Amino acid sequence: MDPSSSNYLYLFLCAVLILFSAYFSSVESALSSMNKIRIKSYADDGDKRAKRALRLEANYDRTITALLIGNNVVNIACASLATVLVVNIFSLLKTNISEGAVTAITTVVTTVVIFLAGEMFPKSYARAHSDEYIMKMSGSLSFLVTVLTPVAFLFQSFSRLIQKLVKSKEEPTVTEEELTDIIETIEEEGVIDEDQGDLLQSALVFSKKKVADVLTLREDVVGIERSMDQDEILAIIRNNKYSRLPVYRRDMDHILGFLSARAYLKAVASGKEFNLASLISKPYYVSYEAEIDDELAKMSKNKTSIAIVRGKKNEILGIVTVEDFLEELVGEIFDEDDVVNHEFMKLGGNYFDVAPTLFLADAFRRMKYTPPVTVPARLTVGVFVAEKLGHTPEEGDTFRFHDVLVCVKEVEDGRLNKVTFHIETARLATKKRDASAEEVTEE
């Protein structure tokens, strides 16, 4: 064969091999970048190409092994042919360039061409059109994987052997921290709005919340002593507007059950004599250490919306409602009679949204919390937060002030707009129990 003709053949074969390299690289990129949820939706609609793409993704290890084998084979073959081609060209030109220089030139040229034409450009295109591209190539890729299955199986066996020797720890595909970052990213990209993002973030931390985080302390619970007369009970119902009230004997350590305000008013309106005990529902108890998602399911199953919270020694710590649980997920739930105060807003589970302009002492007073230290009367929440942090507040900044967890909730254009205070009821209740125990010991 004429040397010049063979050179054209080598050049043609190099071009074909580069095309194959581009194919392998682009398909690999599209497979790893495709939107699995969207492809599954296409498959559910009957798209055969999408079904093939899902099968390839389901057998990702075998598919990627076949692609790597093919890509390495064509790249090595291309480099070898390129070397022969360059050597032939320089021999025809009858130059005095050394063999080492020829090898260096061949290596540089081949690397640049394969990197640009066989890797970078194809991968960039495939990543930008991953769903459409992987469905188009699913047929040829399925055929390729089938053909290379024996070789791929051999390499997979070696891989599994190495994994057994290394004994790497299995980890979840996506961690909770990564999922949080994903939600923040798609919120920034406009896929979901801020409210939807907040709801998803709340759902992630919902299962971590304990009953102790959302209960209402017993000191703040409004109840009815069973010996109260009708006028006293009606006054309590009228002044507090709670749908259910605990009924106790002597004190809150002896709760008999819960009284439905509606049922009591209906009984009073009938004009007939009735026994208060007949209107009291049986008490439902939960542990302060229980997780709220578990208790929400249990309370729903038991058809109760309110429960008594007990500590480690079965002492009564307070009460908790289904509404308290739901407010951890969706935020404050307002009744039609509630008046929205943008300066100070009580949320569920002893959470409070406070404006930075409110005086700290006033905020604690409204929270019914007495700190163990004296708070300056004219100290605003904004100044208090800045002093404690030691820098300009940023969203997400948190610190603890005795039994109160303080979190910067909203900052706009460098200005603090809203702060969340959370009275950590478990810590507070523990301190109060310890203080009571010390008083008994001293006596």
Image (cartoon, rainbow, N blue to C red):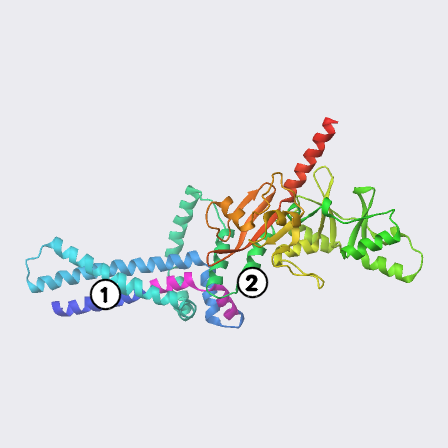
The local crowd at label 1, few if under 14, some if 14 to 19, many if 20 or more residues have their Cα within 10 Å, is many
Q: Along the horizontal axis of the image, is 261 left or right of 83?
A: right
Q: Quadrant of the C terminus?
A: top right
Q: Indicate the position of residue 301 as horizontal and vertical percent values.
A: 73, 55
Q: Residues in magenta?
A: 24-43
Provide the residue designation for mark 2.
Answer: 195
Which of pointers 2 and 1 indicates the residue nearer the eye? 2
* Residue 199 placement: quadrant: bottom right
Locate the N terminus by quadrant: bottom left
- Residue nearest the observer in this picture, 199 or 121: 199
Residue farthest toward the front in the current orientation of the protein: 378
Labelled disc at residue 175: none
User: Observer-nearest residue: 348 or 236?
Assistant: 236
Residue sitting nearer the eye, 277 or 134: 277
| Secondary structure beneath label 2 | helix
The three-letter amino acid code for the residue at tag 1 is Cys
**Image position of 390 with respect to 321: above or below:** above
Q: Viewed as shown, does residue 83 lie left or right of 208?
A: left
